[in-house]
Image (cartoon, rainbow, N blue to C red):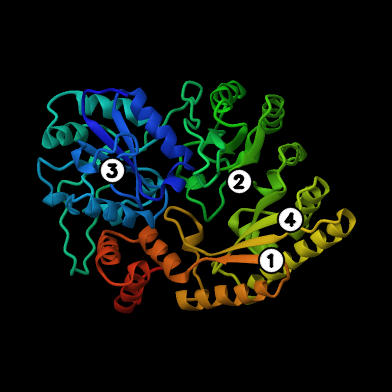
Amino acid sequence: MPAAGPRVAFVYPNAYSVGMASLGYQAALQCMRRAGLAAERFFSYSAPVSWDSLAPAGRFDVLAFSIAFELDWLNILRFLRDAGIPLLARERGERDPIVLAGGVCVAMNRAPAWPFLDAFVHGEAEALAPALARALRAGERRRGAMLERLAGLAHVETTAHAAFDAESTESAALPDPPPWAWIESLDDAPCVSSVATPESEFGDMALLDLGRGCPNHCTFCWIGHNAPPYRPSSLERIERMADLALPLSDRLGLVSSAVGAHPEIDEICRRLLKRGARLSYSSLRIEETTATMLEALAQSGQKSLTIAPEAGSARLRRLLGKPFGDDAVLDIVDRALSLGMASFKLYFMTGLPTETEDESDEIARLVEKVRLRMVSAGKKSGAMGSISVNLGLFTPKPGTPLPRLANALDFAARARRLKRIERLLRRIPNTRIAASSPPLSGAQSILSLGGSETSRFLFDALDGSGGWRGAFQRWIRTRPDTRL
């Protein structure tokens, strides 16, 4: 790690276990270090000191946050407060670090954090890091001078000490964001774990990048409609990354928005298995999951399968951009059972535009069909697995088609529907349910779709009583017309 030049505190605004399970965070850290920046790791939910040198955050020249989830905006404010750094950009002086952020939440909607950050960076780390490093190292190491140099970069925007009034109800227009920086070829850009630790959410699994973007266009997903074009990794790049990952762990996680869409996914599985790897996938699209992919999981010792039917009815799945019926779900369940995978985790959403109550009830009916398949297989094998259901409340994303459809139910009615489905699911034997919290889902929607007024919502969640839940209740009470 370079000893000279500006020091960068690279912060993942969540727990260490979550941050180290983020390939994006690990890869961006490597990019900064390769570019010559002295970047050190920091995480929320622990003291604001470096995990690499124990130096406090306030001694660094730059605090750079990588944010992938809307509710983590609050953790950025908490980190600044705990580190003794003024929350508002306009109140920071020459002795304070530059505070900037990048990541998918910056691309989706940076409005909630506008008055709190000095700058936002827009793009992939491989495309941004060299220019950022040059700008930070090019001259005086003073906060004002470095900010001025950053402001001259094409993919960086500075907030120019944005105004903030915690009592105001007005929303000010933000400038158009700069273009998103991205690399056309991934061949010379390794994106692989540098650390595999059992303290990560994924255990000691090493992660490697299977591609960027997404060829699918699910109507609820931001990536397929707004990210740069789909760029699958070449076989050669994947093998080079495997060479780096396997000394860390034989458990390899293939990370992509669409694992099964890779044109050479079967050959990738075969080659990595030959090298002694045990494979996992970041996501499985039911209609893109090949026999080879399932067999690779079984050969890797996997005893459970995670799939996302998303909705209870085939009509709603078509609306979401996932055109398959219950038969396709049950077919992949049968194939997994035949390979010795006895347990299943299923992801669903409710509260979708145009969803009827009967369609939401079909979630429980589909889960019961899966259970009956498991019972039948268990009688033959003598082993019965379990079902885990993750039930979420639909949270709209900007720049996607689905929020444009009128939702016949208000937010309270959607929350009641979620509770109804949860009750139906709890009647199904051998089934565990994890249901989202309506206030947290509502807070996420506000941060996702709102304008500059959401900075006051964010501040209230930090400064007011009750955290997110209290802030959400106060927001809805005073702004009943908020789009959710």
Of the two numbered discs 3 and 2 on the same chain, state the one appearing first in sequence.
3
The spot of residue 38 in percent (x, y) is: 28, 28
Of the two numbered discs 3 and 1 on the same chain, state the one appearing first in sequence.
3
Of the two numbered discs 1 and 4 on the same chain, state the one appearing first in sequence.
4
The spot of residue 400 in percent (x, y) is: 47, 54
Amino acid of disc 1: Thr
Of marks 2 and 1, the one in the foreground:
1
Q: Nearer the viewer, residue 73 or 153?
A: 73
Of the two numbered discs 2 and 4 on the same chain, state the one appearing first in sequence.
2
- How far apart are labels 4 and 3 at the CA level? 47 Å
Of the two numbered discs 4 and 3 on the same chain, state the one appearing first in sequence.
3
The spot of residue 302 in percent (x, y) is: 70, 44
Amino acid of disc 2: Ser
Amino acid of disc 3: Val
**Residue 49 shows which numbered tag?**
3
In-image side of 183 versus 278 (left or right): left
Which secondary structure, mark 1? strand
Amino acid of disc 4: Val
Image: 474 above or below 234: below
Of marks 4 and 3, the one in the foreground:
3
**Residue 274 shows which numbered tag?**
none
- How far apart are labels 2 and 1 at the CA level? 21 Å
Q: Which residue is mark 2?
A: 283
Q: Nearer the viewer, residue 395 or 66?
A: 66
**Residue 329 shows which numbered tag?**
4
Q: Within the image, what quadrant is residue 26 found in?
A: top left
- How far apart are labels 3 and 2 at the CA level? 34 Å
Of marks 3 and 1, the one in the foreground:
3
- Which residue is at the far left? 94
- How far apart are labels 3 and 1 at the CA level? 41 Å
Which secondary structure, mark 2? loop
